[in-house]
Amino acid sequence: MKIKRVIYILVGVISTICGIFGIFLPILPTTPFLLLSIWCFSRSSVKLEKFVRNNKYFGKYIDDYYKGEGISLNSKRISITVLWLGITFSNFILLENHYIQAMLTFIAIFVTVHILGNPTREYNKNESCSAEGKASLSQN
C-alpha cells in the first residue's frame, strides 16, 4: 500500500510541475495536468490536494472546471490570445520545420475548440482581474 501512495504522490507532483509550466508554455495544457494531480493527491495526500485546490493563482479555476461551472469569457479571451500569440511567434520566428509548424497549428486549433466548447461562466465582480488573467493561462 505504501508503494502505491508514493507512486500517486510522484505522479501528482510531476503533473503539478507540468501544469505550472503550462501556464507559461502555450502548447502545454495546464488544466488536465492539474486535474490529474488532484486525482492522484486525493488518493495519497490530503495536504497536497489542498495545496493544488487552494492555490491562489489557479485553484478556483481548477475547481470551477472540475465542477463543470465553466470558464469566464475573459479567461477564454486571454487564453486563446496567449495561445495564438505563442504559436504564431513559434511558427514564424523560432521554427523552420514546416511539419512541426503544422503540428503546432493543429494542436492550437484543437485547444481553441476545447476552450470554446467549455461552458462560459458569468464574470463574478468579486474576482480580481489580475488573478483571473494569470489563472486564465492555465486553461490552455
Image (cartoon, rainbow, N blue to C red):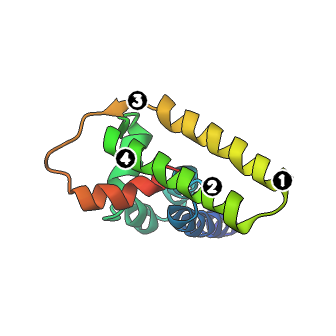
Q: Nearer the viewer, mark 4 or mark 2?
A: 2
> What residue would you read off at disc 3?
119
User: Is 110 rendered above or below residue 20?
Assistant: above
- Apparent side of residue 10 relative to residue 67 in the rendered image (left or right): right
Residue 58 visible somewhere in the drawing: no
Q: Residue at x 60, y 63 (%)?
A: 15
Is label 4 in a helix, a strand or a loop? helix
Q: Please name the amino acid that badge 4 sits on.
A: Ser
Of label 4 and label 2, which has the lower sequence position?
4
Of label 2 and label 1, which has the lower sequence position?
2
Q: Position of residue 7 (x, y in %)?
A: 67, 66
Label 3: few (<14), some (14–19) or many (≥20) C-alpha neighbours in 10 Å: some
Q: Please name the amino acid that badge 3 sits on.
A: Pro
Of label 3 and label 4, which has the lower sequence position?
4
Q: Position of residue 124 (x, y in %)?
A: 19, 42
Q: Position of residue 140 (x, y in %)?
A: 53, 50
Q: Residue at x 72, y 51 (%)?
A: 104
Label 3, label 4: how far apart the Cα atoms are: 12 Å
Q: Please name the amino acid that badge 2 sits on.
A: Ile
> What residue would you read off at disc 2?
87
**Disc ID at residue 98:** 1
Q: Nearer the viewer, mark 1 or mark 3?
A: 1
Q: Nearer the viewer, mark 3 or mark 2?
A: 2
> What residue would you read off at disc 4?
75
